[in-house]
Amino acid sequence: MTFTEKDMYEALSERHGTHVQHCLKQATVGIMGLGGVGSHLAGSLTRIGVGKMLMADYDIVELSNINRQFYFLSQIGELKTRALEDNLAAINPFLEREYITEKLIEETIPRYFHGVDILAECFDEPAIKASALRVALTGLQGIPFVCVSGLAGYGRSNDIVTREIYSDIFLVGDNRSAVGPGSSLMAPRVAIAANHQANQVVKLIIERTCE
């Protein structure tokens, strides 16, 4: 029997257990915003083998992004969706990924993401973060929603936690830190928050489809 590269990759992925890996492979996760948190979240979900991701961002990679986002100097000027696809394909080319390259607004979020199993909010702007939460509460009921707020600066890692703030609405952050003078978005806490989100997404997939 001749094994393809895909066969070998899937065999390695099954270290989590065949049943668990099957559940992950069948899941569809939506990610809104592909900046620091969203790009690293996508990377973690790709590494663990989530089968399909639907991701949205309209922006391009800028020099100011490189200090905390999953992009490289050679990708400056590219659309984040295109650059991230190259980076994720280098990790696992065999998963299904779709991209939305437009600025989301409250009215379009339900249209694009109504079919996902779990939706992650990774926006930077407070207004669209609030809009996304309203949609999760009123327009996408039944789809777990994992959002993030409160991760700026270099405070204690363990202050960043995941809390269920409403039924099926999970918030990652320390509940207080905000971007301001002397408190920028820094790579360590951005990555910690992204992986809190990734862990919550994986937890939801496994608990709701495997057990």
Image (cartoon, rainbow, N blue to C red):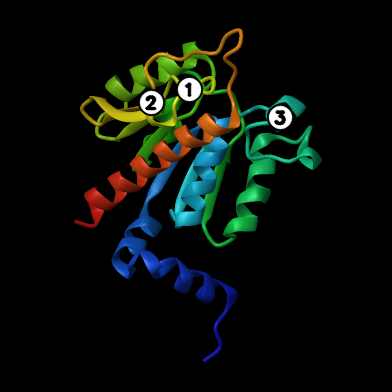
Are there few (<14), some (14-19), or many (20+) residues within 10 Å of tag 2?
few
Residue, far front: 156
Q: Quadrant of the C terminus?
A: bottom left
Q: Are marks 1 and 3 in contact (CB under 8 Å)?
A: no
Q: Are marks 3 and 2 in contact (CB under 8 Å)?
A: no
- Residue to which mark 2 is pinned: 159
Q: Looking at numbered disc 3 in the image, what kind of residue is underneath it? A: Ile
Instruction: Name the residue rendered at 78%, 34% in the picture.
Output: 76
Q: Amino acid at mark 2?
A: Asp
For discs 3 and 2, the disc positioned in front in the rendered view:
2
Q: Please give left or right for residue 158 compared with residue 102 in the image.
A: left
Q: Nearer the viewer, mark 1 or mark 3?
A: 1
191 above or below 208? above
Alpha carbon separation for disc pair 3 and 2: 31 Å
Are the two marked residues, 1 and 2, in contact with CB atoms closer than 8 angstroms? yes
Marking on residue 155: 1
Residue in front for this viewpoint, 115 or 147:
147
Which residue is tagged 3? Answer: 60
Instruction: Specify the farthest residue to the bottom.
Output: 1
Residue 139: image x %, image y %?
A: 31, 24
CA separation in Å, label 1 and label 2: 7 Å
Secondary structure found at label 3: loop
State which tag comes first along the sequence, 1 or 3: 3
Q: Secondary structure at mark 1?
A: loop
Whether residue 25 is visible, yes or no, is yes
Of helix, strand and loop, which one carries label 2? helix
Gap in angstroms between the C-alphas marked 1 and 3: 29 Å
x and y, in percent, of residue 7 in the image: 51, 75
10 Å neighbourhood of mark 3: few (<14), some, or many (≥20)? some
User: Given the current orientation, which residue lies at the most extreme top position?
Assistant: 181
Instruction: In the rendered view, tell whether residue 62 sits above or below residue 94.
Output: above
